[in-house]
Image (cartoon, grey):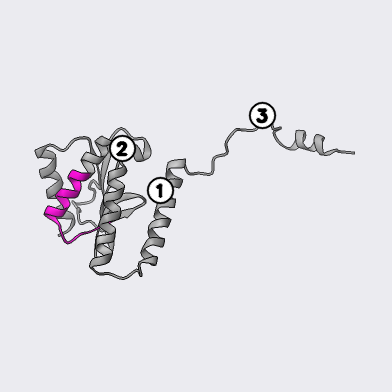
C-alpha cells in the first residue's frame, strides 16, 4: 500500500528540495510592465476612449507623472526627449505605454522612451515601433541606447523623429 508520504517522495520533490520560486516565463519587471499596460487601457476606457484635447492633456499628464518618478539620470533624459518631441513633432500625442513615456500618431505608438532602471539595464532606450517610417533598404535600427543628451545626440534624435513621423 502506498501512502501519501511515499507518493510525495517518489513522484516529486519534497518541500526541502523544491525551488524557492517558480518561473512563469516573465520577470517581475515584465509583469509590472504588463500591469501598467492594463491600467493604461482601463484608464483610456474610463475616460471614454474618445479623442480630443482632454484626452491628450490626460495622456501628457500621465507621461509627465511617470517621468517624475524616474531616477535622476533617466528623468533628465526623458525630459530632454520629451522637449525634443514637443519641438519637432508637436502633433504626436503623449501617453504612457507599458508604464513608459510614448508618443502616438493617429492612435498608434510611433516612439517610446524606456528608462535604464525599468529593466535594470545599463542605458536608457529610445525605441521606434513599426509605425515609424525609418526604413532603409532591407534592414534598419529601431532602438537606440541613450546615455546622455549632447547637442550631437539631440540633432540625431530630431532627425529620427522627423523621419519617423514623415
For this orientation, the residue located farthest to the top is 16
Choose top left, top right, bottom left or bottom right for residue 108.
bottom left
| Range covered by the magenta-colored residues | 79-95
Residue 95 horizontal/vertical position (percent): 28, 56
The image quadrant where one finds the C terminus is: bottom left
Between the residue at mark 2 and the residue at mark 1, the CA separation in whole angstroms equals 14 Å
Task: Please identify the quarter of the rendering in which residue 38 is found.
Answer: bottom left
Q: Residue visible at 42% across and 42% down?
A: 29
Q: Which residue is mark 1?
A: 33
Let me know if residue 130 appears in the view. Answer: no
Secondary element under disc 1, as helix, strand or loop, is helix
Give the spatial CA distance, label 2 vs label 3.
36 Å
The spot of residue 22 in percent (x, y) is 57, 39
Residue hosting label 3:
17
Residue 162 placement (x, y as % from top left): 13, 54
Q: Is residue 89 on the magenta stretch?
A: yes
Tell me: 126 left or right of 120. Answer: left
Amino acid at each position: 500500500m502506498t501512502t501519501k508520504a511515499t507518493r510525495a517522495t517518489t513522484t516529486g520533490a519534497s518541500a526541502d528540495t523544491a525551488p524557492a520560486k517558480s518561473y512563469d516565463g516573465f520577470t517581475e519587471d515584465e509583469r509590472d510592465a504588463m500591469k501598467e499596460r492594463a491600467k493604461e487601457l482601463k484608464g483610456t476606457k474610463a475616460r471614454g476612449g474618445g479623442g480630443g484635447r482632454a484626452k491628450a492633456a490626460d495622456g501628457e499628464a500621465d507621461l509627465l507623472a511617470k517621468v517624475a518618478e524616474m531616477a535622476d539620470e533617466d528623468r533628465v533624459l526623458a525630459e530632454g526627449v520629451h522637449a525634443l518631441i514637443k519641438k519637432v513633432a508637436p502633433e504626436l500625442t503623449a501617453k504612457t505605454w507599458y508604464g513608459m513615456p510614448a508618443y502616438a500618431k493617429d492612435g498608434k505608438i510611433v516612439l517610446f522612451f524606456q528608462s535604464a532602471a525599468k529593466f535594470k539595464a545599463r542605458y536608457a532606450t529610445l525605441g521606434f515601433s513599426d509605425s515609424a517610417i525609418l526604413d532603409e533598404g532591407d534592414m534598419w535600427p529601431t532602438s537606440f541606447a541613450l546615455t546622455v543628451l549632447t547637442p550631437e545626440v539631440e540633432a540625431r534624435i530630431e532627425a529620427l523623429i522627423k523621419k519617423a513621423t514623415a
